[in-house]
Image (spheres, helix red, strand yellow):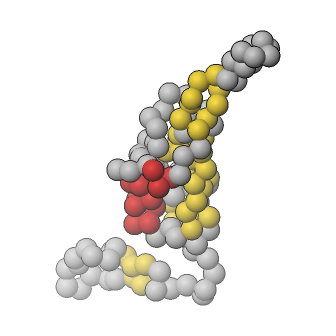
Amino acid sequence: MIGTDPAGGSSASRGTTITIYTSDGTKVGVPLPNVVGQKAPAATATLQKAGFTNISYAWDPNPAGKALCSVTATDPAAGTTTPTTDEVTVYVAGVTTGNNGNGNSGNGNNNNNTAIVDPAACSG
């Protein structure tokens, strides 16, 4: 069984037709929840509650002012019907540490550096 109508947990009046959906074993997808803006742990909880089991993280090297540890995007994108066993990549805002200036060589390289922080460091 992969679902019912009315949905599980709801009540139905006596005599109401209840439809039970079954699967032939092929992968069934559900819409990926929108977790953009959530902190990484909250996003994980939201995705797990929706049934997703294969969640990975990547740091967004250009978070454009987003709060540290906040989700900036997912792959696949929110709303995409995705099998719950497929990998979902959650992109998380890293820390911009400023420029590396490289004063010794005088080349004026002003590339921003993004610190790589263990996702476990993102709490709440």
The number of callouts visible is 0
Residue sitting nearer the eye, 101 or 6: 101
- The answer to whether any part of residue 29 appears in the image is no
Residue shown at 69%/18% (left/top)?
101
Residue shown at 51%/52% (left/top)?
119
36 relative to 107 in the view: left or right: left
When the figure is inspected, residue 97 is found, relative to residue 59, above or below; the finding is above
When the figure is inspected, residue 108 is found, relative to residue 116, above or below; the finding is above
Residue shown at 39%/79% (left/top)?
4
When the figure is inspected, residue 93 is found, relative to residue 89, above or below; the finding is above
Quarter-wise, where is residue 86 in the image? bottom right
97 relative to 2 in the view: left or right: right
Quarter-wise, where is residue 98 in the image? top right
Residue furthest to the front = 104
Residue sitting nearer the eye, 6 or 35: 35
When the figure is inspected, residue 64 is found, relative to residue 103, above or below; the finding is below
Residue 7's x, y, as percent? 34, 73
Residue sitting nearer the eye, 68 or 98: 98
Residue shown at 41%/55% (left/top)?
41
Residue 105's x, y, as percent? 80, 16
- The answer to whether any part of residue 13 appears in the image is yes
Residue 74's x, y, as percent? 57, 50
26 relative to 104 in the view: left or right: left
Residue 25's x, y, as percent? 61, 86
